[in-house]
Amino acid sequence: MIIKKFVGKTEEEAVEAARKELGSGAVIMNVKLVKRKGLGALFGGKRTEVTAALEEECDTMNKVRSTLGFQTQAGTEGQSPAQTAPRNPESVLAGNNRLSTQESQAIEKKLDSLQELLVNRFQQSEEERKDALDKGDMGVVEEEREEEGQEITEQQRFIRLLYNTMLRSEVDEKYANQIVDEIDVAGQPNMPLDRILANVYQKMILKFGRAEGITPVEGAPKIVFFMGPTGVGKTTTIAKIASSISVDEKKKVALLTADTYRIAAAEQLRTYANILEIPFRIIYSEDEALDAVREFQTYDFIFVDTAGHSHKNEDQMGNTVKLLEALKSAGECQVFLVLSATTKYRDLLKIVSSYEEFTEFQLIFTKLDETMTMGNLLNMKLFMGTPIAFVTNGQDVPNDIEQFNPQKTVKQILSTKQERNS
Ligand SMILES: Nc1nc2c(ncn2[C@@H]2O[C@H](COP(=O)(O)OP(=O)(O)OP(=O)(O)O)[C@@H](O)[C@H]2O)c(=O)[nH]1
Ligand SMILES: [Mg+2]
């Protein structure tokens, strides 16, 4: 595995540099703002570092092992990925383009706890299996036999553990199967466990992909439209993002709300607008929306809040579609579907299916602080093919929001704290 660090003015630029050099198979393992954290990375000016990895066809095992902190095999023993990766003088990396010992240690740390947890759990289940064998508890042992009567290998048992961990995190069985089926243990019967773990980790990160987030338009306001079911946190999320953009980025932001169903809803957004000292308008019709866009032509962003409604309410859904169509005729729009991570999987499927009419949008998942299981994030990404841009993790405006970090989420999915046998 080649692991390298790339720097760019924006994350996209750094990722592009990584893909240019390592090719489209490169996996982004880590993203770091050099000076500033949070949403600031979206608007340039600050440097973003990404750590990208590329798995090579041959001799990957030792390098992956080394990255994960396992013992390496003869030949590369003691060498860090920095020492084993090939040199490329044309790299866009800042300074030394190879990972320093310190940097590779950071990645090791990131994966270490995950690896430890899984291997411990694996060893525990191995002991239970041996106990069962000693006690002659053939029921347990039988479970671990292949259909054709062959005992399954250590690799297959480890994959089963990863698979069960995904299910405990509420990843849909179908997607968990897809992920583990892509690991070719049959073709490589001696694949080390850490290599299997690194493969699963990478595949899940790739499946999440990356969202573009909120991007400004040159010389015109970007209209940013938020929609979603009731009470998921649309208005609160708008306040968080608007605050970050207007206060930290010094961009001109105006807030509009089409939520005229509840007086309190409009007042909630007006209060945030007052605190941020930015303009606020209530729009009762598509014409009023167009007037507002004209009024704020010199602004950088116009955020549009909509009324939350049940996915079963077709009238309200129709109004949301019409409003968005009108806004699209007035300027460049970006649409976010806001979902709560606490909603049950089956309900989420119904909800997102009702937004099929909206062809292009990104996801925001709220209330991550209220759930232990992150599987639905992967389920929804794979069900809709729609990337996740932001996640929110608390009620505090403006702090409880961050750009979606696939690495962190995959780690959470694979290290669910739920008790075994629960
Ligand atoms: N725990 C937690 N609560 C949140 C989060 N985001 C929003 N909330 C809370 O969820 C509740 C509803 O938030 P709103 O922003 O009003 O939700 P909404 O989607 O605009 O609601 P409607 O306009 O009624 O559809 C409020 O109490 C928020 O403080 C979050 O990330 N975590
Ligand atoms: Mg609201």
Image: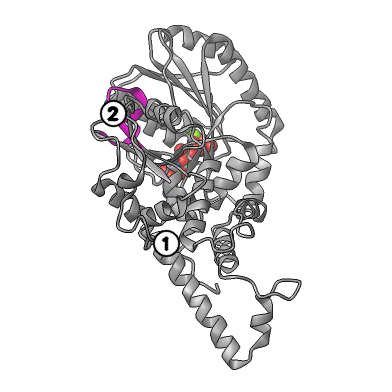
* Nearer-the-camera pick, 41 or 270: 41
At which x and y percent is residue 185?
60, 59
**Quadrant holding the C terminus:** bottom right
Instruction: State the CA–CA distance, disc 1 to disc 2.
Output: 30 Å
Whether residue 151 is visible here, answered yes or no, is yes
Of callouts 1 and 2, the N-terminal one: 2
At which x and y percent is residue 256?
46, 21
* 45 drawn magenta: yes
Snapshot quadrant of residue 392? top left
Residue position marked by numbered label 1 in the rendering: 115
Left or right of residue 372: residue 148: right
Note whether ligand 1 is within 8 Å of mark 1. Answer: no
Q: Residue furthest front?
A: 75
Q: Residue at x 60, y 47 (%)?
A: 379
Q: Secondary structure at mark 2?
A: loop
Q: Secondary structure at mark 1?
A: helix
The region drawn magenta spans: 36-50
User: Does residue 330 lie above or below 388 as drawn?
Assistant: above
Within 10 Å of disc 1 (Cα), the crowding (few <14, some 14-19, many 20+) is many
Amino acid type, residue under disc 2 in the picture: Arg
Specify the label residue 47 is tagged with. Answer: 2
Left or right of residue 274: residue 35: left
